[in-house]
Image: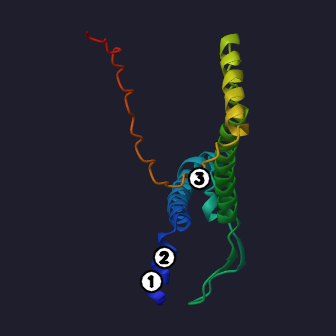
Amino acid sequence: MSVVSEFRQFISRGNVIDLAVGVIIGAAFGKIVTVLVDGIIMPPIGLILGKVDFSDLKLVLAPKVGDTAEVAIAYGAFINTIIQFMIVAFAVFLLVKLVNAARRKEAEAPAPSAPPAPTPSEALLTEIRDLLAAQKAAAPAPKVVPVKAEAAPAKAVVRKPAAKKPPATKKT
């Protein structure tokens, strides 16, 4: 099997496609959450805490000197990322909770009830049917005796008895 055909078979499996769709949607959801945190949630928090932009908060270890870049720990970006993670985790929690509730509801659904008990006449007919089937199974099969072909008997000749003549009378 060639590598191309193996790859085509691997890609066409349902689980891989589902996973790809999940990753794409997850990436888009991540972008939405990033914009939500950076543009909507953090500015009011920064305003409350003293007009600070959280994404710019950092601990400078070495200032910029000439062409050398500033060395700093950007803990504001880390705080933004933690808030983004919490939002995504909460959304996933709600999704899992929804799926579990649906599964529980499906499991609790009443099983189809057993068919109602047969009426007395149906029970009697069933019993008769079973007895007839048992008799048919127990009855020996009729023996088949082969018949030998014999010569047909000759026709008997049937003779009619001779008619009696009336006694002759003497003539004088």
Quarter of the figure with the C terminus: top left
Q: Nearer the viewer, residue 121 or 62?
A: 121
Task: Residue under label 1, please give it.
Answer: 5
Q: Amino acid at mark 1?
A: Ser
Task: Residue under label 3, please give it.
Answer: 37
Q: Nearer the viewer, residue 111 or 55?
A: 111
Q: Nearer the viewer, residue 11 or 159?
A: 159
Residue at 54%, 68% (x, y): give it: 16
Q: CA distance from mark 1 to mark 3?
A: 44 Å
Q: How is the image coloured?
A: rainbow
Q: Is residue 81 left or right of residue 12?
A: right
User: Residue 48 location in percent, x, y?
Assistant: 66, 44
Asked if the residues shown at circle 1 and circle 3 are in contact, with their CB atoms under 8 angstroms apart, the answer is no
Q: Amino acid at mark 3?
A: Val
Numbered disc 2: secondary structure: helix
Vertical comparison of 29 with 166: above or below: below
Task: Residue under label 2, please give it.
Answer: 9
Work out whether mark 1 precedes mark 3 in sequence or the reverse, and give the earlier one.
1
Q: Amino acid at mark 2?
A: Gln
